């Protein structure tokens, strides 16, 4: 699942994109100790096996944290959060073994000031169907 999200985040690397703003600094689950800011971390928070009425649906809760440096203030990280929302909300994803994968934003960006950085945490829901056997 995370590969499909990372693929979406890294697909457009042109100037002015979220990827460009981050300098390509995107991590899964946790960042490296001294990773430069800004950065983005994608994590699976919950991945319950859902089977509605015999269907092979999956649903996962995804948490995305954007970190920016404190001297830049909230403007830069807010703009990146807007780009993240535009890129992923209601976006179709390509995930091996699944069809109809789609992201939806449940909680759009909770801004907090950390010790040496600003953080915007958003929560997303990913839905998909298990691909039929060939």
Image: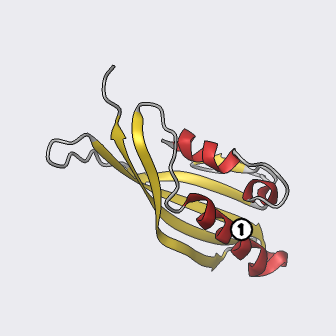
Vertical comparison of 97 with 21: above or below: above
Residue at image x 75%, y 68%? Answer: 68
Vertical comparison of 98 with 16: above or below: above
In the rendered structure, the answer to whether residue 34 lies left or right of residue 129 reads right
Which quarter of the figure has residue 37? bottom right
Percent from the top left, x then y, of residue 101?
Answer: 43, 46
Q: How many numbered badges does the structure rendering display? A: 1
Q: Give the camera-side residue of 103 and 118.
A: 103
Residue at image x 21%, y 45%? Answer: 51
Which quarter of the figure has residue 20? bottom right
Q: Give the camera-side residue of 71 and 14.
A: 14
Vertical comparison of 22 with 98: above or below: below
Percent from the top left, x then y, of residue 94?
Answer: 52, 40
The extreme top residue here reads 134
Q: The C terminus appears in which quarter of the rendering?
A: top left
Vertical comparison of 41 with 58: above or below: below
In the rendered structure, the answer to whether residue 33 lies left or right of residue 62 reads right
Percent from the top left, x then y, of residue 73?
Answer: 79, 80
Task: Tell me the element at label 1.
Answer: helix
- Mark 1: give few (<14), some (14-19) or many (20+) Cα within 10 Å: many
In the rendered structure, the answer to whether residue 45 lies left or right of residue 4 reads left
Residue at image x 36%, y 48%? Answer: 47
Colouring used for the render: secondary structure
Q: Is residue 44 visible?
A: yes
Residue at image x 49%, y 60%? Answer: 90
Q: Is residue 36 visible?
A: no
Percent from the top left, x then y, of residue 24?
Answer: 77, 49
Which quarter of the figure has residue 82? bottom right
What residue is disc 1 on?
Answer: 80
């Amino acid at each position: 699942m995370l590969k499909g999200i990372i693929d979406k985040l890294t697909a457009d690397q042109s100037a002015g994109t979220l990827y460009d703003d981050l300098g390509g600094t995107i991590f899964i689950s946790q960042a490296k100790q001294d990773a430069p800011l800004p950065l983005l971390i994608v994590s699976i928070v919950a991945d319950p096996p859902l089977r509605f009425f015999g269907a092979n649906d999956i649903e996962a809760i995804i948490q995305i944290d954007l970190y920016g440096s404190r001297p830049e203030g909230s403007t830069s990280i807010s703009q990146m959060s807007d780009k993240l929302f535009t890129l992923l909300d209601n976006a179709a994803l390509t995930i091996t073994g699944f069809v109809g994968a789609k992201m939806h934003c449940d909680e759009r960006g909770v801004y907090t000031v950390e010790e040496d950085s600003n953080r915007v945490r958003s929560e997303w829901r990913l839905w998909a169907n298990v691909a039929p056997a060939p």
